[in-house]
Amino acid sequence: VGGARFLHGLLRVVPASDVTIVGNVGDDFEPYGLHVSPDLDTILYTLTGAIDDERGWGVRGDSDRALARARELGDEAWFWLGDVDLGLHLARTALLRAGATLTEATRTLATAAGLEAELLPATDDRLRTVVATDAGELDFQTYYVRRQHRDEVRSLRFAGAETARPATAVLEALAAADVVVLAPSNPLISIGPILAVPGIRHALVQRRERVVAVSPIVAGAALRGPAGGMLRSLGHAVSPVGVARLLADVASALVVDVADVDLAREVEDAGVRAIIAPTVMTDHAARRRLAEAVLDAAGAGAAACR
Amino acid sequence: VGGARFLHGLLRVVPASDVTIVGNVGDDFEPYGLHVSPDLDTILYTLTGAIDDERGWGVRGDSDRALARARELGDEAWFWLGDVDLGLHLARTALLRAGATLTEATRTLATAAGLEAELLPATDDRLRTVVATDAGELDFQTYYVRRQHRDEVRSLRFAGAETARPATAVLEALAAADVVVLAPSNPLISIGPILAVPGIRHALVQRRERVVAVSPIVAGAALRGPAGGMLRSLGHAVSPVGVARLLADVASALVVDVADVDLAREVEDAGVRAIIAPTVMTDHAARRRLAEAVLDAAGAGAAACR
């Protein structure tokens, strides 16, 4: 959600044709055999104006007649799928079953939905986030949605990541980019599964000077979601410092919220340049200002405003 | 549809707990990987009062937000799936993916939907109707829905039928039944795939004296659907006589519409007792009267009215 909102601001600052978005697929899952890509969908819905802004996910005004019926018939139906939202999953599933890669399917759907920027899954190979808890290893959506991320996270792994190859278009975008932004998303479960693809990590390390991250942790807490508790239980500082240490090998700069200005020194001690800016995206203008600050930090402000 | 409407009348004449319905699964298919059982669903919707009576299939008042969205995103979406209808397919698919047989899944769904009679698929094994046309072999729904049954039918086969085993409950019902009714449905593609299961055909032959069929052909035409053209192109008479010849080895009697009274002799020449009755189900009362006529024909009227 944070990443999608950041992108929404970015696309008000740079032309959509200059932007390639690489999305996490570690959250993907297959309820009823339908292929759902929650992170790609949230980005798509946010950028095409379809998003339910209050919830941060799903389609505004969507109904849930299908799921309500499934529930009446005894199905647990714990993952909310709106009717219009289901249409996207049906179309994606049809494309994948007809042999399209996830990259191809995503491109077809995003184009049809009117997205002008390029949206890419990090990999076309199967990569799934697995969360180890005291209740055992849980697939991501079971941990996050079904059990409401209430379990303490003992460890994370990204099944399939070691052998996953980046989609070709991802490597091309990373090689050609003026700036690579790691959006203000959970560094462990949103950015982590992307960095877990060896080819992507390698490409970012190569271009580290052009990589700017944005801290999703402000004033000791995540703005949204379980990042805070998850960082803590995995032994990381719940602060931009913790984020800096996690991303230092791939990012040369971290945008830190003004509320955390006193942590700038510690962030820099982690080997990452600290850039102080307001990062809380309270409204559309704030999203835009954050995008500008990030591009400035990368020295790409001028180029972006051509 | 004819079968479902007949059953609707039957359940007004005999207690639901006395009725076991064996449905065709040759029409089943898996759009988007979801398991759709059109014949079982039409029966379920008809008997629970959910049916869209004008169309004869689907849920009355259903919306199609999911499918419309899939179509907007480029999917062909040629098989209409309403939103509420999708809920049934989602629930069924979840049950099957969790390891339930189709019999078990159908029972769970039918019970939850409030069906009191027992509804059984003919087999839990994969059996699919394949239609040979000048455009090649088509799976049933491609022939029927996508191409609007406009192709001339050169031959039919029921893939998987030779090795399909009847569900145990089907054999038990056939062995115990006072009367077995072959409902007024297309003898080739609705009843045919059921009879193609060797165990079911064998069971019916054993109990032939108790088996009564109802002709879906009246006055030289099918009341609904492509049965007329299909019988003709496959070399069968488009009349109760054609139906009698097709079903003579498993049925001892055929209910023939009053409009075809002059064909009674020819039906009997096929080795099947002809019972003349009004068979056109113009309203609920007509459905009920047809059920009564069928039970009378089987000599089970008195027993049924206990």
Image: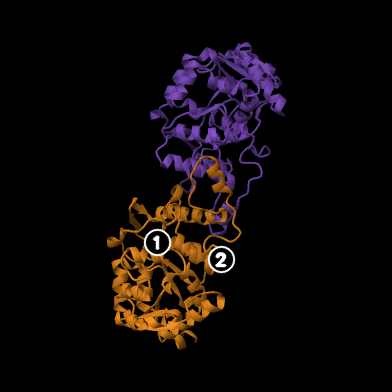
Chain colours: A purple, B orange
Q: Which residue is mark 1?
A: B25
Q: Nearer the viewer, residue B273 or A114?
A: B273
Circles 1 and 2: CB atoms closer than 8 Å: no
Does residue A285 appear anywhere in the picture?
Answer: yes
Q: Which residue is mark 2?
A: B53
Q: Amino acid at mark 1?
A: Val
Q: Chain of mark 2?
A: B
Q: Nearer the viewer, residue A175 or A261?
A: A175
What residue sits 49% from the left and 43% below the top?
B75
Q: Nearer the viewer, residue B188 or A130?
A: B188
Does residue A147 appear anywhere in the picture?
Answer: no
Quarter occupied by residue A181: top right
Q: Is residue A145 above or below residue A208?
A: below
Q: Is residue A212 above or below residue A154?
A: above
Left or right, B257 with reference to A46: left
What percent of the width, then of the height, locates residue A35?
48, 42
Q: Amino acid at mark 2?
A: Asp
Other residues around mark 2 within 10 Å, as few (<14) / some (14–19) / many (≥20) = some
Q: Nearer the viewer, residue B142 or B178?
A: B142
Residue at the extreme bottom of the image, as rendered: B302
What percent of the width, then of the height, locates residue A69?
57, 56
Q: Earlier in the sequence, mark 1 or mark 2?
A: 1
Quarter occupied by residue B277: bottom left
> Mark 1 to mark 2: distance in Å?
22 Å
Of labels 1 and 2, the one closer to you: 2
